[in-house]
């Protein structure tokens, strides 16, 4: 029974992987100049008024200021590059070339369609060639991309592509499981549903056995 469930899951994940295409650098649409902090605060006041509340009532007076400050943290992934995080690798790994797997890396992001949070866990595995990266760096890499306006698919691909590019790994496997509040709080209002996305490169893409090994290690029953 359990084996059959895994088979079904495998099939689904492979389909999803096919949908996540390698991210080619898109021609940058010239980003508008960053507004002044006062302008951002004024925009929050406008949104408060749009909700139907009064931005001048006492409890809300400092809210625009707080929201803008929170945005600096929630969206701190802009202006940072994966090289900032992944440049230092440990070369002296004594010939270790087996799979490195870190699972259940928690992350919080915001969907680019509604600017509503989606959150969950990332599982990352790779086969080192020329050194390994500090485990905390993987978490920082996830944050770097999660703290932007995102889709889960793009986030998954960006993490995998950055690891492949900067680590020169023989293969990278990334799987994200997340709950999207824009689905649970609004729209279809289905809470508890989790969306899974995955991306496999190198040996994980080429070998079903490698994918299965990865999927088996991150199975909830093995955690
Ligand atoms: Zn959304």
Image (spheres, grey):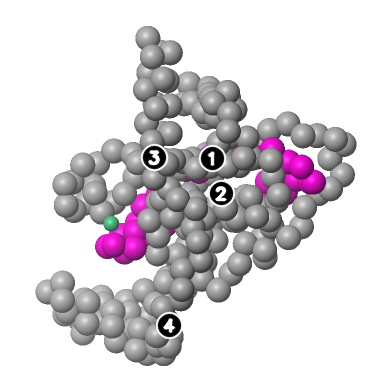
Between discs 1 and 2, the one toward the N terminus: 2
**Residue 197, horizontal then vertical, whole percent:** 42, 42
Rounded to the nearest angstrom, the CA distance separating label 1 from label 3 is 11 Å
Question: Which residues fall within the magenta stretch?
Answer: 109-136
Residue that mark 3 sits on:
16
- Contact flag, marks 1 and 2 (Cβ < 8 Å): yes
Between discs 4 and 2, the one toward the N terminus: 4
User: Can the viewer see residue 119?
Assistant: yes
**Residue 38, horizontal then vertical, whole percent:** 37, 90
Please state which of residues 68 and 111 is positioned toward the viewer in this rendering: 111
Q: Secondary structure at mark 3?
A: helix
As drawn, 207 above or below 161? above
Crowding at label 3, few (<14), some or many (≥20) Cα neighbours within 10 Å? Answer: some
Ligand 1, seen in the image, is in the quarter at bottom left
Between discs 2 and 3, the one toward the N terminus: 3
Circle number at residue 200: 1
User: Can the viewer see residue 107?
Assistant: no
- Contact flag, marks 4 and 3 (Cβ < 8 Å): no
Which residue is depicted at the point 63% across and 35% down?
Answer: 203
Quarter holding residue 179? top left
Crowding at label 2, few (<14), some or many (≥20) Cα neighbours within 10 Å? Answer: many
Residue that mark 4 sits on:
30
Rounded to the nearest angstrom, the CA distance separating label 2 from label 3 is 14 Å
- Horizontal side of 71 relative to 202 (left or right) equals left
Q: Secondary structure at mark 1?
A: strand
Which residue is depicted at the point 40% across and 51% down?
Answer: 152
Crowding at label 1, few (<14), some or many (≥20) Cα neighbours within 10 Å? Answer: many
> Label 4 CB, ligand 1: below 8 Å?
no
Crowding at label 4, few (<14), some or many (≥20) Cα neighbours within 10 Å? Answer: few
Quick check: is 130 in the magenta stretch?
yes
Quick check: is 43 in the magenta stretch?
no
Residue that mark 2 sits on:
160
């Amino acid at each position: 029974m359990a084996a059959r469930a895994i088979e079904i899951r495998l099939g689904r994940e492979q389909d999803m992987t096919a949908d996540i295409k390698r991210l080619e650098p898109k021609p940058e649409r010239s980003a508008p100049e960053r507004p002044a902090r006062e302008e951002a605060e004024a925009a929050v006041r406008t949104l408060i008024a749009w909700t139907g509340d009064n931005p001048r009532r006492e409890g809300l007076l400092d809210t625009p200021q707080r929201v803008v400050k929170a945005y600096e943290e929630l969206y701190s992934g802009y202006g940072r590059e994966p090289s900032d995080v992944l440049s230092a690798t440990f070369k002296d790994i004594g010939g270790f070339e087996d799979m490195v797997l870190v699972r259940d890396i928690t992350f919080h992001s915001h969907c680019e369609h509604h600017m509503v949070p989606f959150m969950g866990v990332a599982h990352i595995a790779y086969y080192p060639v020329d050194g390994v990266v500090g485990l905390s760096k993987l978490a920082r890499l996830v944050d770097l991309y999660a703290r932007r306006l995102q889709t889960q698919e793009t986030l998954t691909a960006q993490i995998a592509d950055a690891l492949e590019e900067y680590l020169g790994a023989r293969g990278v496997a990334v799987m994200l499981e997340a709950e999207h509040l824009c689905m649970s709080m609004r729209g279809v209002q289905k809470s508890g549903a989790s969306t899974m996305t995955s991306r496999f490169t190198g040996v994980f893409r080429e070998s079903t056995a490698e994918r299965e090994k990865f999927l088996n290690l991150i199975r909830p029953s093995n955690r």
